[in-house]
Image (spheres, grey):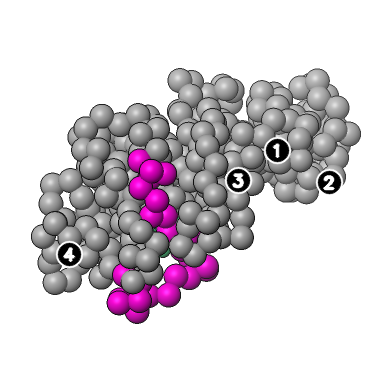
């Protein structure tokens, strides 16, 4: 959709894009097609889209034959969104969708769900559709971390994700130990998925343009987790370690887990990890050894 058409659509419906909701709309057809083409989704595949906005990416997905569940938080976008997705029959008010959420069921291949994507009833969605699901979104940047945590830790089976995100978030997703960008978010994402940066999207491609750079990334689920430790226990240890990343591992873990530093030190010794190290120097597997040692020492419930 041309920039002028997007501005006209917004004006006619009295919508002012809000930075608070990360509303930077993408109309460039070539870029939208590149994003959708990167998604490994045969016709008929179930695709979850977060934040359809003005429906440009939704359209591109539908044109490829996907079955789309698009989750939008901002009801002010309902009228322009329904106009863009015009060929689909429209009811007067949203109906009741999965798990009691408001929904517009616009034919057999498109459902708009009016909800906060960070708090989706993942079990209900998994019950609706066996999957595997694909995830495709121009993500509202403020919600990238919480949404991905909720999605990855949830039960929805998925096989591919192509996401337009802030360049900095992409860097954090794929960051390696020993780098500034490496943190609990990197560990969480890499526990579940391989991360690949595909291409850049210029600021000027968005309406309105964001103040940050954007890239398209692909996530592919790992065949098996990189560590055998119980995931939630491992993650608790990772989050505690990075909770105070300037502190030594020993002190950060003691503070984050509410335990005595001496007990932590003993567990670290048995894991062969120096307690004076900083969290950012540990690999996912190192965190696994620490988590196992803490559980074996009875310091933390696995
Ligand atoms: N997909 C559209 C595009 O590419 O032009 C819009 C992308 S815009 C970056 C992000 C969209 O996510 C906006 O429509 C915004 O209202 C919506 N959004 C923001 N926070 C959300 C949340 N927590 N849950 C669902 N949608 C959200």
Q: Are marks 3 and 4 in contact (CB under 8 Å)?
A: no
Instruction: Report if residue 233 lies within the magenta region.
Output: no
Q: Which residues are magenta?
A: 9-33
Q: Residue at x 73, y 48 (%)?
A: 243
> Magenta stretch: residue 27 in it?
yes
Precedes in sequence: disc 1 or disc 3: 3
The residue at which mark 2 appears reads as 246
Coordinates of residue 236 in the picture (x, y in percent)? 63, 41
In 3D space, how far apart are the residues under numbered discs 2 and 1 (Cα atoms)? 13 Å
Crowding at mark 2 (Cα within 10 Å: few <14, some 14-19, many 20+): few
Q: Residue at x 22, y 64 (%)?
A: 82
For the residue labelled by badge 1, is the local secondary structure a helix, a strand or a loop? Answer: loop
Circle nearer the viewer, 1 or 3: 3
Secondary structure beneath dot 4 equals: strand
Residue 95 — which label?
4
Of marks 2 and 1, the one in the foreground: 1
Q: Secondary structure at mark 2?
A: loop
Would the CB of label 4 be found within 8 Å of ligand 1? Answer: no
- Give me the C-alpha separation between circle 2 and circle 4: 50 Å
**Residue 72 visible in the picture:** no
Asked if the residue at label 2 sits under 8 Å from ligand 1, the reply is no
Mark 1 = which residue? 182
255 shown above or below 190 = below
Q: Secondary structure at mark 3?
A: helix
| The label number, if any, that marks residue 167 in the structure image | 3
């Amino acid at each position: 959709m041309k920039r002028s058409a997007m501005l006209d659509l917004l004006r006619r419906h009295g919508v002012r894009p809000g930075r608070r909701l990360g509303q930077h709309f993408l109309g460039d057809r070539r870029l939208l097609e590149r994003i959708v083409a990167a998604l490994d989704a045969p016709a008929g595949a179930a695709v979850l889209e977060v934040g359809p906005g003005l429906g440009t990416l939704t359209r591109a997905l539908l044109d490829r034959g996907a079955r789309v569940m698009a989750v939008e938080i901002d009801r002010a976008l309902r009228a322009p969104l329904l106009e863009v997705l015009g060929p689909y029959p429209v009811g007067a008010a949203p109906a009741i969708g999965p798990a009691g959420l408001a929904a517009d069921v616009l034919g057999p291949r498109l459902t708009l769900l009016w909800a906060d994507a960070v708090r989706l009833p993942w079990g209900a969605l998994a019950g609706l559709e066996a999957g595997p699901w694909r995830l495709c979104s121009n993500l509202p940047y403020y919600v990238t971390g919480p949404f991905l945590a909720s999605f990855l830790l949830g039960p929805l089976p998925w096989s591919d994700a192509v996401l337009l995100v802030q360049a900095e978030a992409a860097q954090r997703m794929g960051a390696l130990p020993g780098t500034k960008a490496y943190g609990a978010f990197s560990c969480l994402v890499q526990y579940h998925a391989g991360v690949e940066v595909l291409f850049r999207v210029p600021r000027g491609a968005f309406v309105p343009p964001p103040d940050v750079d954007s890239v398209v990334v692909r996530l592919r689920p790992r065949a098996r987790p990189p560590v055998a430790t119980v995931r939630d226990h491992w993650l608790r240890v990772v989050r505690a370690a990075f909770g105070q990343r300037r502190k030594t591992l020993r002190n950060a873990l003691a503070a984050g887990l509410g335990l005595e530093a001496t007990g932590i030190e003993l567990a670290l010794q048995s894991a062969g990890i120096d307690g004076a190290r900083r969290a950012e120097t540990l690999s996912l597997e190192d965190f696994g050894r620490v988590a196992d040692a803490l559980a074996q020492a009875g310091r933390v419930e696995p």
